Image (cartoon, grey):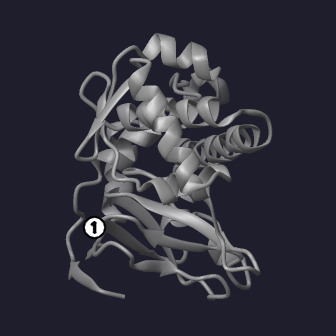
Amino acid sequence: MNSERTTHCGDAEAFLGRLRACVQLSSDDEHALTDVIRDVRRLSAGTHLIRKGDRPHDVHILLEGWAARYDVVPNGGRSITAFLLPGDLLDQHVTVLGEMDHSIVTLTDASVAFLPNGRLESVAVRRPVVASALWWSTLVDQAVLRAWLVNIGRRDAFEAIGHLLCELHARLAKVGFTINTDFELPLTQEEIADALGLTPTHVNRTLKRLREEGYITLRHNMLVILDIASLKAAAGFDASYLHSKPVDLMRLMA
């Protein structure tokens, strides 16, 4: 693993922003969460955080950059099952597994927090709102996976790619990585193809159609969604599965 290690808490704002999108955290909750982020490493693109078959020891939080969760089928083809964005908790529950059933690799240069087994759980035990926030985050991840299954199984290439672009915009907006409908999209056409069960050629043709019909522009990894309402309608995108409205868990637990 090519990495440059630091021993400070790093920039945890994206991680906190992800959790704030789900629940209302107190300042003490946020301080407790940032306090566990002590080992932050700069990783180059193409670095494996974990490989299928590994026995996990750390939990990872992606602070900057993009990563992907994937598996490889017998013929050597890769299936990407998640794009991981700044603020994502990559593998909260992996330490309960005997070995990993998938791999996680950085797609860009990235900043990643490494948390020893049990450190995050110790905060959750002491702070029920944090525990609920972490559980809520896991449920949202599962909802995203269900949306991806619908993309692969029931949407055509135009709808699936449009839906993915809308989702990435919504997820990045929650953690402050968009400017209006503009955001950095560092994905290759092959990576999009591996996520949607398409060929790179089909992805290329579909992106061209999205540009020609006035939905997007894409230059130098910067994507601009020109008419997000129309793209959402064309792709059948409903952001409710991202559960972005904060919930007052203290009121619910009272």
Task: Give me the residue at 54% from left, 24% from top.
Answer: 248
Let me know if residue 89 appears in the view. no
Local crowd size for mark 1, using a 10 Å CA cut-off: few (<14), some (14–19), many (≥20): some
The answer to which of 58 and 54 lies nearer the viewer is 54
Let me know if residue 9 appears in the view. yes
Quadrant for residue 41, please give it: bottom left
Picture coordinates of residue 45, whole percent (x, y): 33, 72
In the rendered image, the vertical position of residue 115 relative to residue 22, given as above or below: below
Picture coordinates of residue 83, whole percent (x, y): 51, 53
Secondary structure under the numbered disc 1 in the rendered image:
loop
Quadrant that contains the C terminus:
top right
Specify whether 9 is left or right of 159: left
Quadrant for residue 56, please give it: bottom right
Q: Amino acid at mark 1?
A: Asp
Quadrant that contains the N terminus:
bottom left
Q: Which residue is mark 1?
A: 109
In the rendered image, the vertical position of residue 145 relative to residue 181, given as above or below: below
